[in-house]
Amino acid sequence: MLDLWTKYAPDLRHSVIDWFTGSPLDTERTFPNMKEGDLLIGAFTNGQVGHDRPFPGAGHYRGHIKGLYLCGSSSHPGGNITGLPGYNCAQVLFSDLSIPAPWAPEPVLEKLKNSDMKQPWHTMHSQPVPGISVMIAILFIVSSNTQGQPLKPDFTLGDLYAALTLNPALRENSGGEPFAWYATNNGDLFVKAFRVWRDTAWLNRGIAYYEFLRSHMHAGPDGYIGLIGPPIHDYGLWNNEVISDALVANLMLEFSELVMNDAMLKKTYANKARNMSLSARST
């Protein structure tokens, strides 16, 4: 590696005072929560990003024990050495103690004071929540009857599809990173519902939703297809944010993986799974 660098910085070799090497295994041994040296401390999958990080119901930085708080890269917004998980957690902690946080903007403080997320995560699901959140709660609290069979959902796949595609936030953000976060959050429920109830109607409607997401992709100046629009940190600059495309691609790849590992599903959905995989790779 030093030989490669010295091609571009010839005096570098003579400027090195000391050096050491480290592997992902060394990192894991030093920091056990950084599994396989994972800087992000937890994959950025649809079930554990944003308010679902580190897992659904725990995204408000409050633990299930009073006085226990969550932060670090396993909490929103994740790793990359931003300091934001600790910053956000500190605001929540100060709010719970009714201590003004001098560094926090006033709107954030007011939002925290009025938040309905003050209770620990294990009590949250008993609170009434609007719209699609109700469907999610129903889907993931998969109860069983006396025969041990999963209960049927008391909402339809049409309800889920409509709740996702008619989300007002999608009309306000027709492309870019904001659209990706809103559109893909809970977009994995079609596959998850199929895994519970084994009804391919969920997959059929899921395919329709993936096509809906693909219809919002366009070719940029570089020829690549993606969700062109503003990133969440700067609405004045349009680009093709990598994470936006990755979020959509992840949904399609999850569907493809399910199909290609199931002999019965491959008979019907193999071509669609291959197309989804190719589409994911081309974004």
Image (cartoon, helix red, strand yellow):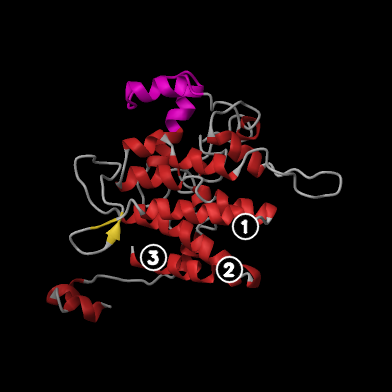
Query: For the residue marked with disc 1, what is the amino acid?
Result: Thr
Looking at the image, do the residues carrying marks 2 and 1 touch, with CB atoms under 8 Å apart? yes
Query: For the residue marked with disc 3, what is the amino acid?
Result: Ser
Task: List x then y, in percent, for residue 134.
Answer: 59, 34
Q: Residue at x 39, y 57 (%)?
A: 246
Looking at the image, do the residues carrying marks 3 and 1 touch, with CB atoms under 8 Å apart? no
- CA gap, disc 2 and disc 1: 10 Å
Task: List x then y, in percent, for residue 132.
Answer: 54, 36
Visible in this render: residue 8? yes
- CA gap, disc 3 and disc 2: 19 Å
The residue wearing badge 3 is 279
Q: Earlier in the sequence, mark 3 or mark 1?
A: 1
The residue wearing badge 2 is 268
Query: For the residue marked with disc 2, what is the amino acid?
Result: Thr
Q: Residue furthest right?
A: 146
Task: List x then y, in percent, for residue 124.
Answer: 61, 31
Q: Quadrant of the N terminus?
A: bottom left
Q: Residue at x 41, y 42 (%)?
A: 182
Mark 3 or mark 2, whichever is nearer to me: 2
Residue 4 tag number:
none
Q: Earlier in the sequence, mark 2 or mark 1?
A: 1
Task: List x then y, in percent, for residue 54.
Answer: 53, 46
Mark 2, secondary structure of its residue: helix
Q: Quadrant of the C terminus?
A: bottom left
Q: Earlier in the sequence, mark 3 or mark 2?
A: 2
- CA gap, disc 3 and disc 1: 22 Å
Mark 3 or mark 1, whichever is nearer to me: 1
Q: For this rendering, which residue is in front, 177 or 149? A: 149
Residue 200 tag number:
1
Q: Is residue 174 above or below residue 271?
A: above
Q: For this rendering, which residue is in front, 282 or 166? A: 166
Magenta residue span: 90-115
